[in-house]
Amino acid sequence: MKKPALLLLCLLLAAAGFGATITLEPGTPVFRTPELPSEVIAVASARTELPETGSKLVLIQRHPLARYYRLSEVRLPDGRSGYTHPRILLTPDGNLDFGNMLEWWRYPLAVLLCGGLAALAVTLWKRRREEDPWRRLELGLLPVLLRMTLLVLLVNSAQNIIAAPADETGYYSNLIHFLAGDFSERWHFTVGTSIFYLPFELLSGTRQLADLLIPVSWAEGFLIAPLSLFLGYLIARKLTGSDRKACAAMLIWAVLPFVWHHRPDFTGRLFVAFFEFPSAEFSYRHYINLIACGFSAMSDTPSTMLVLLCMTILLYCRVSRRSAAFAAFVFGVSCMFRINNILFLPAIAAIVWLRQPEYLAGVRRTLTNAAAGAGAFLLGFLPQMLANWKFFGSPLKFSYTNYAEGAHTYLHWSFIELNSAFYGTVNQLVWIPGLLSLLFLKDRKLRIILALWAVPVIWFFFGYSHGTDDPIRFILTSYPAFFIAIAACGVWDKLTRSQIGWLLLILAGWIVCIPNASYGSFGWYFAEPHHLLWRTGLFPPLAAAGTAAMAAGSVALFLTKRKLGIFTALASVLYLLGNAYWLALGLAAVLLLAVWDMAQIGCRTWKLRQPHGE
């Protein structure tokens, strides 16, 4: 027993860095300061071992991305200290050659995820016609493992690229001032993300934001975002009654961030989106991939997960005051991450009304559950209200709405023109089939829930002063609603092999035909209305071929499955037009239809409760 204990002690001492050394290859420079580039004070002329006395994480930023390098602090033979990296070499012409920056543990992680995904896919295929008690769990894990596998391959290819810090500086400033007991400066950011950073800060203890960005990005990208996919699956299977539809909905969410991109031109107010392979370069396309997959240190990924967790609790937990309080507490915490999460309250209320009416069974029970939920929500939201009270004099006075005292974000109708064009263009691949699916849905209750889930938050950011900062992460929580609608709309039921082939032909047409660009100006379309019904710019041969594929596929489907043919034809026309303002009107139409459905269901429920003869 002594030998294993001694070996373990030696390993722990080595891991702690006692007596650590670093080996430098010939040509490895040593820098005076932990910066890149920095003054070179020594260059290894032969293979050299130097004592390692510490490390420093360096960020090289060019918005919206950053590269990180963990430089080792070393002690030179003459007693001077410097900073180096074993994979950075100095070339004969004086330039720096950056080698492979991939950490060793990323290789086994990629192998593990690829192997797990392959094993799960083989298991599902082999047992596709057998009774499998684990089938529900396996279907839920399929999109999770697929997303994680694609993401690890992408970030490994990109090596040391992460999203550059933006709002993270404000969240981190809140935390540092709190830990220091310094409340002299007002907090202009919500406190949820600051609290989320706390365990990472306690583990690092460096008081440097850069040291948090990497572990938080990995935690959000490989733990919280995959958990959101699984929660989305649980919600979808409860709302649709189908494990396969729920799995299909989340598979779309798992894959789409890697293949759908956009290019904004804010100077010309022109926006275009397109299919493209993911990028591992230091590019805007790579930033889109990271943000849409949740690989960042921003607030949107944990915020989305908490909202989905609230819905899952309501749908799966036994109806009681405790479950109402638990769901409301989680929702309160989610609002600390993003205050606009309060816009999901109508969808949550619709879930309670239409899927869990036992919460509203009788006046007494309704009031009891409402009181428990309200109290729990206030408890979950309490840290934010205390911060508001401390810095702005009222628990309901937020920095975001207090423009006169430092807030820089607000709502105004003048932003709708540009924001709706930007959001509609970027999200058209989701909104076009999603809106049509909501219109085609026969289940009125499901349409009400999904419409109230997706539309209000999108409209909010149409009028948001900083809405153009990101058209994906701001409305990240709305995506599952569209994907569930697409999977549940009913047009895909009982497809034959030939119909699947025609659908693949239409998809190929969509891929090769770049959708129309949208111009962010009402006046331009009013002056030349034909642009609402016609493509802007040239129509190259490849786009013509794609259009022909869409037309042929839709006609063939119409002849064999009329409803599906109509659906694909309408979707293809909207895709070719590519006009974001049509989609903005579609959002309004879907919400109005949901309100009509609510009125119909409410009237029918009221009539059923009336005594006979009245």
Image (cartoon, grey):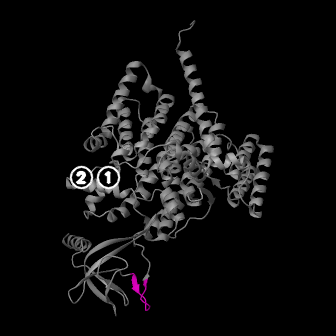
Q: Quadrant of residue 31?
A: bottom left
Q: Amino acid at mark 1?
A: Ser
Judge left or right: residue 535 versus residue 283: right
Q: Which residue is mark 2?
A: 178
Q: Secondary structure at mark 2?
A: helix
Farthest residue, direction bottom: 45
Farthest residue, direction top: 613
Judge left or right: residue 54 versus residue 70: left
Percent of width and height locating residue 492: 67, 44
The residue that appears at 37% across and 59% down in the rendered structure is 216
Percent of width and height locating residue 486: 61, 44
| Dot 1 alpha-carbon crowd within 10 angstroms: few under 14, some 14 to 19, many 20 or more | many
Disc 1 + disc 2, Cβ < 8 Å:
yes
Judge left or right: residue 38 versus residue 493: left
Q: CA distance from mark 1 to mark 2?
A: 9 Å
The residue that appears at 48% across and 64% down in the rendered structure is 152
Q: Looking at the image, which is closer to me, 445 or 286?
A: 286
Q: Looking at the image, which is closer to me, 527 or 556?
A: 527
Q: Quadrant of the C terminus?
A: top right
Q: Which residue is mark 1?
A: 194
Q: Quadrant of the N terminus?
A: bottom left
| Residue 293 within the magenta-colored segment of the rendering | no
Percent of width and height locating residue 290: 48, 61
Location of residue 220 with respect to 157 vertically, above or below:
above
Of mark 1 and mark 2, the one earlier in the sequence is: 2
Q: Secondary structure at mark 1?
A: helix
Magenta region, residue range: 87-96
The residue that appears at 51% across and 53% down in the rendered structure is 468
Q: Looking at the image, which is closer to me, 187 or 206?
A: 187
